[in-house]
Image (cartoon, rainbow, N blue to C red):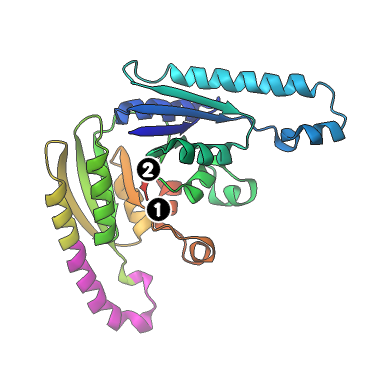
Amino acid sequence: MRILVGVDWSDEAFAAVEQIGLLYKPDEVVLVHGVDLGILQSPLVAAATNLQGYDEFRQASMDAGRQAVERCRTLLPAETPSIRTLCEVQHPAAFILDSAAAVKADLIAMGTHDHSRLTEVFAGSVSHRILLHATVPTLIVKGKARPVTRVLMAVEGREDAIRLHTWLTSHPFKNPVAVTILSVVPSLAMVEPNLMVGFKSWSEEHNRQAQQVAHDTAQALAGPQFNVTTDVRMGDPVATVCEVGNSHDLIVVSSHGRKGLDRFLLGSVSHGIVHRAGCSVLVVR
């Protein structure tokens, strides 16, 4: 398993690196730092503004980036078979995404400063952009690194369940964990009153299907690495997953990969969970 971690000098980045060592036994870890010089990214811009000391500034930024990467290297377990480092003058999010594609990473890990969604829309966020544009599973680490013993696996349906089951069994955790398989059926309170009659029978059927999916997935996943239980609830999916997730160390969800206008209009359950959850979230694609 090859894991790429986007790093800088923040405590959140250090926590993400430490969390990788607690969660997995990777074959290789790639530590990536993009040195962001803003509008001075291009020497031509610096020359046009007659900026004095540009070369020194650029070199100092590169040196600081390399030091951050080397600091992160020391946070990984000594038994990690291979650790690679990449540090270049690049926009961080683009450099992380391009590097993940180049090294064929199985997973991208990032710490988050936990900005509000409004702040991310106007100011931007590296973890936000990675979450939106990554084509491989993404681990968003929140808070300090901690051992993972309880995992919440949130499924929306059979396709989700298959995708998550495949990932968890193909990329096993470092240690056995207790897994709660949670399926949330939208509650009647979320429906317009004039649609209530038709929705009630729909809800009962979906509740039955959710119970079946959770049961089948639990049977397929159960084994030495996973102690599995199931939980089916009604309510708002994002709020319910985050509430149940409060008693877990990690939430695992599937992304439907909505893009553009579809994402804007319909939103994203996985994205909402990442923003509101109190623990780290693994988004499987």
Magenta-colored stretch includes residue 192: yes
Could you tell whether 2 is left or right of 232 in the image? right
Residue 234: which numbered mark, if any?
A: none
Q: Can residue 16 be seen in this view?
A: yes
Magenta-colored stretch includes residue 232: no
Does residue 163 sit above or below 24 in this rendering? Answer: below
Disc 2 crowd, CA 10 A, few/some/many (<14, 14-19, 20+): many
Answer yes or no: do the residues labelled 2 and 1 have beta carbons within 8 Å? yes
Does residue 113 sit above or below 131 in this rendering? Answer: above
Give whichever of discs 2 and 1 has the lower sequence position: 1
Displayed quadrant of residue 40: top right
The secondary structure type at the circle numbered 1 is helix
Does residue 190 sit above or below 70 in this rendering? Answer: below
Across and down, in percent, residue 226 comes to: 16, 40
The secondary structure type at the circle numbered 2 is strand
Could you tell whether 227 is left or right of 269 in the image? left
Q: Nearer the viewer, residue 257 or 106?
A: 106
Disc 1 crowd, CA 10 A, few/some/many (<14, 14-19, 20+): many
Across and down, in percent, residue 57 comes to: 74, 22
Q: Can residue 145 be seen in this view?
A: no
Q: Nearer the viewer, residue 109 or 42?
A: 42
Disc 1 marks which amino acid? Ser
Q: Mark 1 points at which residue?
A: 270
Across and down, in percent, residue 235 comes to: 31, 62
Q: Name the residue under label 2.
A: 281
Q: Which image quadrant: the N terminus?
A: top left
Q: How far apart are marks 2 and 1 (CA)?
A: 9 Å
Extent of the magenta region: 189-211
Q: How many marks?
A: 2
Does residue 60 sit above or below 31 in this rendering? Answer: above
